Image: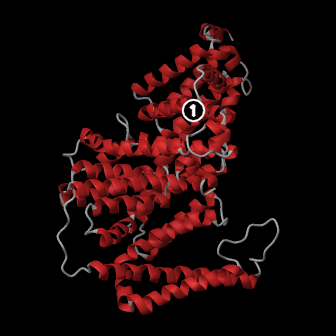
Amino acid sequence: MEFLELFAWMKVSDIATLSIFLLLGMFVLLAIGMPLGFASAFLAVAVIVMKFGPEASFGRFGSGPMSVLAQAVYRQMTNYVLISVPLFIFMASLLERSGIAKDMYDALNQWLSRTRGGIAIVTSIMAVIMAAMSGIIGGEVVLLGLIALPQMLRLGYNQNLAIGTICASGSLGTMIPPSIVLIFYGLVTETSIKALFTASFLPGFMLASFFIIYIIIRTNLNPSLAPLPEEDPTAPKGMEKFLRFVGFLSRFALWITGFLLLRAVFFTITGDNQVQEGLEPIALGMVSDIPYIVGAFAIAAALILFVVGRERAAEGWQMGKGLIAPVIVIGVVLGSIYMGITGITEAAGMGVVAVFVIGLIRREMTFEIVWDSLMRTLRSTGTIIWVTIGAASLAAAYTLAGGPTYVANMIVAAELPTMGIILVMMVIFLIMGMFMDWIGIVLLIMPVFLPIVLKLPVEEIGIFGELDPRQVAIWFGVVFCMNMQVSFLSPPFGPAAFYLKSVAPPHISLTAIFRGFLPFIVLQLLALSVLLIWPPIVTLFL
């Protein structure tokens, strides 16, 4: 006890002083290179000691303020949904090492190679599909950098356009389900992750469409930015190419509708699809769904037999078959969630199994690939876990010291209008995203900001339309993810730049990479403005 009394001078009761110390301490520790997880944990202990004194903090083992930190960490670490994070990372690692992504890129390139800016458009579409498969940002940027960047540079694409397309599109895993950012937001705020996934679909695809529209407009205004590749005289053109594409879609539709028909018949025979009060009907598995499935099957067959022709359909299948494996993985992961078959964690496990089985069928899954993917998963998960432990501790310590109440009172005392308060929060998110990892932001800031947003008059949020009060937390989570989308490209610590630099040719500098980001950051801010001006866009599918 005498030893602890030596540090009695550290006690600070003023929460404003503690907040300033915390802010400055975080910047100093990060500036000297201390990892975010350790910096957060150190500051958590420092806040507790400064608020309650060393004797109250350490005097009674297993009780007192320090035990609150331990309980906060325990709650985070024992949350079942957290298991989905390493599973999604493992799935992304397997996808990166296997040939699934390359075949998908080649298949997309078959259809869009003669379109102005087609390689960049293919890269954006591939990024959307990759995001829907795994939701891991770093792996997507690295993979696109390995596959798409050499192709675009070889064809004479503008370097800034190529870099911006890869990094901005590769960061779409933040917005498009199954996003790891949304999973953590749901864990911290106790918001339905399934509802967050549903709400983020439209904003995510809206942002992707902004990228594609920008590429199309800019390359058509300045064709020198994206020269067309040399024409293959043997490749189908015009209507012939379109018919082959229809043939591919029709043949794929036969497989899908055939599977759904067998599934619905099976449920009918077993009686699992009987209408019961209190239970949701099985999606596309009820007796009433069978006529529609049969009708879709018949239309697909008629297109092949009477419009496209079997030969063209077979050629179209060969051109587009690289898209089949990714669609299967997406169907397994998101289909199992939205059809009510599994939860988020089980869906992640099923996705891993799906990628592994597809790799075995393609004879690409070797022991070396699995081992390397496991090691990458271990390293990435370790980083996330340490940041989670440190940030959860700091959030608990600051909450215990009365920080959230102080911040809330300070914001309210500013007497800003509702949208003014939200815009201040957006600026704070954007600034912190320039210097801090998203995990730390969601764990440290969200427990402070979300309660304030929930108390704001819901009718004053946005300009057009009105939110349901029950969906404010979901809307704010999607808006937060759009902010984090910007942070992945924001200098000086935009992670996407360093991911791409690790696989880019030596002549491409970090400065050049950040320069290529600028138009895409403007597009991201435009998408963020849409969410703020018209909040109901987030809840259209809920």
**Residue drawn at (60%, 52%), measured in percent from left and top?**
539
Asked where in the image residue 148 lies, by quadrant, the reply is bottom left
Name the residue: 56% across, 81% down: 257
305 displayed left or right of 469: left
Disc 1 crowd rating (10 Å Cα; few below 14, some 14-19, many 20+) is: many
Q: Residue furthest front?
A: 464
> Is residue 450 left or right of 316 when viewed as pictured?
right
Judging depth in this view, the residue of 343 and 357 nearest the camera is 343
**Residue 105 higher or lower than 135, as above or below:** below
Q: Secondary structure at mark 1?
A: helix
> Is residue 411 depicted above or below 290 in this figure?
above
**Pointer 1: what residue?**
444
| Residue 489 point in image, percent of width and height | 37, 42
* In the displayed structure image, the side of residue 96 where residue 295 appears, left or right: right
Residue that appears at 38% across and 65% down = 101
State which quarter of the image contains the N terminus. top right
Number of marks in the rendered image: 1
The answer, for residue 222, to whether it is visible in the render is yes
The percent coordinates of residue 147 (x first, y second) are: 30, 60
* Residue 258 appears in the figure: no
Q: Quadrant of the C terminus?
A: bottom right
Classify residue 379 as left or right of residue 397.
Answer: left
Q: Is residue 322 above or below residue 287?
A: above
Indicate how the structure is coloured in the image: secondary structure
What amino acid type should be assigned to the residue bearing mark 1?
Leu
The furthest residue to the right: 277
The location of residue 510, given as percent across then percent down, is 27, 40
Q: Nearer the viewer, residue 514 or 1?
A: 514
Tell me where residue 58 appears, x and y as whole percent. Answer: 67, 20
